[in-house]
Image (cartoon, rainbow, N blue to C red):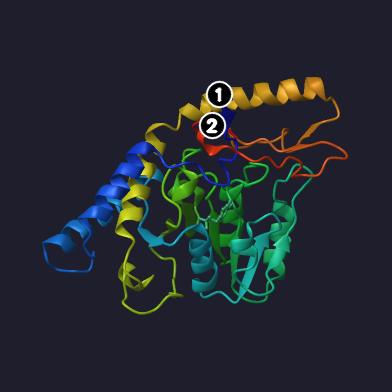
Amino acid sequence: MNAIAYLDHNATTPPRPAVSQAVTAALTLGGNASAVHRLGRLARRKLEEARERVANLVGGAARVVFTGGGTEANNLAMRGCHRALAIVSAVEHLSVLDAVPAPVTVGVDGTGVVDLGDLENRLAAAERPAMVSIMLANNETGVIQPVAEAARLAHARGALIHCDAVQAGGKLALDFTGLGVDYLTLSAHKMGGPQGVGALIMGADAPLEPILRGGGQERGARSGTENVAGITGFGLAARIAGEEIGHFDEIRILRDGLERDLVAMAPEAKIIGAETRRLPNTSCISLAGLEAETQVMALDLENVCIGSGAA
Ligand code: PLP
């Protein structure tokens, strides 16, 4: 049998077996976390345990609002922050770029790193209170952005700042307070949790106007019966990812070896972002004359060998 390595973890990483089990158990248990009877209280306990685990993954945070994924959390931050102007990096995920009309974009340099001078100029030129959004790590190149510096610049001009940490979550040690941002987005399925679950992490003073209204769940920040099973899986995935973060040192060695061998075979290959800090699992390679999505294969999924965190 030919094993095929799964190398698309930035698109989604397969749920960890322990997570699948925890999701199934929570689903079987049932219970609405807003209900006051025993089953409801059990569901609430699972929810709050997951909230604590997700907060721990980012070194502690004032508030964790569970959402239906990273896209929703990005939209919630950008639209719910009460700021009339958005200033975002040009390399943000579409769920940031398209969340609000006509954002001002900040350029990146040749290595894909946000131009802080350009950010400073855009902040100085802003005529209305702004919301800045700079991702922590790019989904295609893995390039890590100077978010803490951007946060200092934003706050010096009275702006709020959001960080999309969907790709960094579970791969880099995160420190919400150290980054100095007001909002931070995580997505469960990028760290071995279930798809369709995410979180908006918020500082104590960060304003938030809900975009989903109704039952007032998540302390009014996001109405709708919580996905207790999915959130339970997210919490467990966050806990395991935090415990196993050192594993990415090995992944980095494998990635670097792969890139070295590739460049030896094809010296014209360009590794995007190689000169700067990148996620340890990500490799973005450009080869002149080749389309980005060159290879389309019919996969026999039974033969796919799932690595745990390779690029
Ligand atoms: N932000 C980044 C950087 C992403 O890579 C993705 C997904 O690929 C998202 C946001 C959206 O997250 P979700 O798939 O949970 O909606």
Q: Residue furthest right?
A: 289
Rendered location of residue 165, percent (x, y): 53, 50
Mark carried by residue 1: 1
Instruction: Return the residue at label 2.
Output: 303
Up-down relation of residue 277 to residue 115 (above or below): above
Q: Secondary structure at mark 1?
A: loop
Q: Amino acid at mark 1?
A: Met
Q: Amino acid at mark 2?
A: Asn
Judged left or right of residue 145, residue 291 is right
Rendered location of residue 135, percent (x, y): 59, 52
Which image quarter holds the C terminus? top right
Rendered location of residue 268, percent (x, y): 86, 29
Up-down relation of residue 171 to residue 165 (above or below): above
Residue 305 seen by the camera:
no
Residue 133 seen by the camera:
yes
Up-down relation of residue 34 to residue 231 (above or below): below
